[in-house]
Image (cartoon, rainbow, N blue to C red):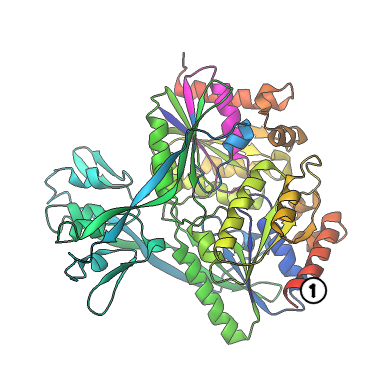
Amino acid sequence: MQIAVSGGKGGTGKSTVAINLAIALGEHYDLALADLDVEAPNDHLLLGVELSNEEPVELFMPRFDYSKCTRCRKCAEVCEEHAIITMRDGTPFLMPNLCSGCAACEIVCPVPGAILPGKKLMGHTYLTETPYGFPLVTGKLLEGEERAMPIVSRAKKRAQALGKELLLVDTAAGTSNTVSKALEDSRLIIAVTEPTPLGIHDGELILRLAKLMDIPAMVVVNRSDLGDVGRVREIAERYGAEVIAEIPYSENVIRSYVEGKPIVLSDYPEAGIFREIASRVVEFLGGGE
Amino acid sequence: MQLVIASGKGGVGKSTVTASLLYLLKDEYRFVAVDADADAPNLDLLLGVERWEEERELIGAKVARINTESCIRCGICQERCPYDCIKVIDGDYVVSELTCEGCNVCGLVCPVPGTITLEEVRSGVVRKTTTRYGFPLISAQLDVGRPNSGKLVTEEKEWAKKLMGELGLEHMIVDSAAGIGCQVIASIGGADLTILVAEPTPASLSDVQRAYKVVQHFRQPAYLIINKADLNPGFTALREWAEAEGIPILGEIPYDRAIPRSMSMLKPFVEAFPDSKAADAMREIAEKVREEILR
């Protein structure tokens, strides 16, 4: 089964919640953590580990065999991204940056072998053992590439293939379709938000997405003393979600984050908050082993 | 001039810094501000925008639909979908609208003509207002679950360019999204230079380095602002990186409670708390922006 940590706004502490929750849940489940914030993956930094077991994520990219191409332009016509342009005589050219790797051109090409399967590197996935007893799968988009979806999709598959009892997914910020992709198949979403007007605005969007996807959500309010938690409660209630924890702004959290030492393992009082979140999750999921 | 403010990482204070910078530059320069974080726009909130003067729906996202009447349930579409967006629900093949990228592979491989169609759906809105500070703001909001397309940002920048012509504005100041994906690429592409905002943490360093690679890809100059600069005195790697790369540091803003407090007042912190130490630092940064960038 899968659960996800998400939150509309960037920098609300999603990754902090995800890694501490993973450590705390590790006592109850055989789990894996997947960092699907592929544009800015940070869970490994917070866990203090170096990414390892790199695997490339390559997409199909057409290569034209001009000796076979009949200049029928079908490939260009079918390309939703307008990545293939044709010269006056119909000779196709690819603009690699626009290519989404969908292979539509290859599917419609009437001449076998006129479009050859080239490859384009989009990013990487990693499988890193952590000192906390669970593996971390990370997706990382290559700088200069625009499309996060293939990396999210591949990293998630790699994490699922580990066959763990529980997969904890850490998503990107926002509510775009790459976030939906990460959330898909979750039994529960932990929405991390801040009680500031910005946090509340974006937090509402993630609750709306959870509702659309029909996934139950619980809300964790980070930096809870920097705004109006009552407003967060109101909005959470409107979406049938409960505020299960408040984490006050804390130098200790920042210190542990900077040092790459998860706070849940420390003696700081904040450790208790993360354990409490974990026990609420265990309660919701119905135990573990 | 078109300048972009980017960070790689969310939550480092990019929009906070942008709002205050706009506030400090507003009397001297004529510019349009663009909030290019269509996924989580909030520059309007920080500038106290209460209403939009004009709003345009952006139809452009495409999603596949399967006609269950003519579907012969062969499963080829599900097999070939590059992103696993097709599920079987109660015996019917159904495309998940919230994850579909609109590539149309399913439609092309489907053996029954007309069964899978690609339909245009709304991807969000692009909107415009005049802030209470006098300068116009272009913003956008992506609909939940839509592809996070750079097209929305391109649309915003087009509108901003048009306004520049109509109103005789000299500059476009773009607050980019976090990350390094299509919206960031659409923001940085075509700009003259990028100001990076980062905080002294390993995560922010890692993310800003990635954003800087995108800037380099477009062969643009970059500058750096260090936010929450005193948060982590032992961490010198951010400054060292900037020095090694030859990225000029425009200034350092200390962590200051005035900033989160100003956020709940929906005002730029330089306006809400002009005597705070963060505001002092921000004014110095604005001075450098005047001297070194907008001169």
Q: How many marks?
A: 1
Say which quadrant the C terminus of chain B sits in. bottom right
Inspect this view and state whether residue B9 appears. Answer: no
Q: Which residues are magenta?
A: A4-32
List x then y, in percent, for residue B197. Answer: 69, 56
Amino acid type of the residue that numbered disc 1 sits on in the rendered structure: Glu
Residue B218 as seen in the image, left or right of residue A103: right
Question: Would you identify the image quadrant in which residue B288 lies?
Answer: bottom right
List x then y, in percent, for residue A201. Answer: 58, 52
List x then y, in percent, for residue B172. Answer: 62, 74
The residue that appears at 67% across and 22% down in the rendered structure is A265
Judged from this view, the residue extending furthest toward the front is A67
Give the labeled residue for mark 1. B291
Q: Is residue A19 magenta?
A: yes
Compared with A285, B216 (above or below) is below
Judged from this view, the residue extending furthest toward the right is B275
Judged from this view, the residue extending furthest toward the top is A289
The residue that appears at 82% across and 56% down in the rendered structure is B278
